[in-house]
Amino acid sequence: MSLFKSTRRTILGLAVAAAATPGWLALGTSEAAAEFPTKPIKVYVGFKPGGRTDTIARKISQYINDNELLAQPMVIVNKPGAASANAAREVLSADQDGHTIMHWSHGMLISNALGVNEIHPEDFTSLGFSGGGSPVWAVRSDSEIKSLNDLVTKLKAEPESLVEAVGIGTVPHLIGAWLADSAGFKTRLIGAPGGADRLARLIGGNADIALFSAQEYKKFQPNGVNAVVFFGAERLANLPDVPTAKELGYDVVWANPAWWLGPKDMDPEAAEKLSAAIKTAIESDEMKAWFSENSLDPYWTAGPEATEQSLAVLTTLKKVAEDNNIKK
């Protein structure tokens, strides 16, 4: 027998054996996937270091790294600009092996609703929400307005009699318009893009209403401001006396969740490992305590449900923007 024929028979024999063992190829693929991650995982954040989205990404990643929930470290990569679109494009163009993901806030939904960019939730693989943070509407402590009911009653009787400080086309603008549409009133707007700007307008007497994150509000409260409504799904533990818009009869909930995303059609086993690690982190006592101390709400929402909720919010934001002719 020639060497060629012998080699050929050996190869054919291996092929037949492989075909007769259906799990053989699958096992090899599974074992390769089980090695994930094989290198550090880049976590893109669309903002400069120090903001809420960046800080949460770092805290969750640090917990995962410190507790070795993954075989390789998570590394934060800040890519600010274009309403987080710069960071999103890095992730969307990355390999689908799970080594490049993103930590996103729902501010990008507003960018989509206003047509600033076309990046859409369904462009990604959704890994899940790791908690969120909701804002409050506040007035001056010496205002005649002591509750949301007072505010609604006054504005219905005297339309545009109260001034709302907002950054045009920002989260405060859209949330305020959303509540106004739901309750049937209208405010008068004055420009104030940042939280410190809105505080200055409010305590300076140039505005009557301003929106702050719960964390900002706790910080600004000694300056003489009083929250009349919280926009979370439920009352916040360290703001127990501030009712939600929903419990007052208005279906307005802005959770601004911490959303973890990967490229579309990402490797499912890599996605599962990442989701499991993030879920373990946010459900830990350490992370729950940190979130609560910072006026944030710790919870886990699985990837598919996170996408479903985000699409519903995006639909609402587009309607609010259209009804109020809000443009960036």
Image (tube, rainbow, N blue to C red):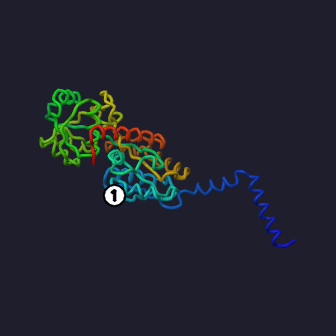
Q: Quadrant of the N terminus?
A: bottom right
Three-letter amino acid code of the residue under disc 1: Pro
Query: Which quarter of the figure has residue 236?
Result: top left
**In the current view of this chain or complex, which residue is farthest to the left?**
205
Where 274 falls versus 302 (above or below)? below
Disc 1: which residue? 80
* Drawn side of residue 13 relative to residue 79, left or right: right
Task: Report the residue at 12% width, 43% height from top.
Answer: 204
Observer-nearest of 309 and 129: 309
Where 230 falls versus 110 (above or below)? above
Please state the total of marks drawn on the protein image: 1
Q: State the image coordinates of residue 194 (x, y, percent, origin top left).
A: 23, 49
Q: State the image coordinates of residue 34 (x, y, percent, origin top left).
A: 59, 54
* Drawn side of residue 2 relative to residue 222, left or right: right
Task: Report the residue at 48% width, 49% height from top.
Answer: 125
Local crowd at mark 1 within 10 Å, few (<14), some, or many (≥20)?
Answer: some
Q: State the image coordinates of residue 102 (x, y, percent, origin top left).
A: 42, 53
Task: Report the residue at 83% width, 69% height from top.
Answer: 5
Observer-nearest of 62 and 269: 269
Observer-nearest of 294 and 314: 314
- SS state under label 1: loop
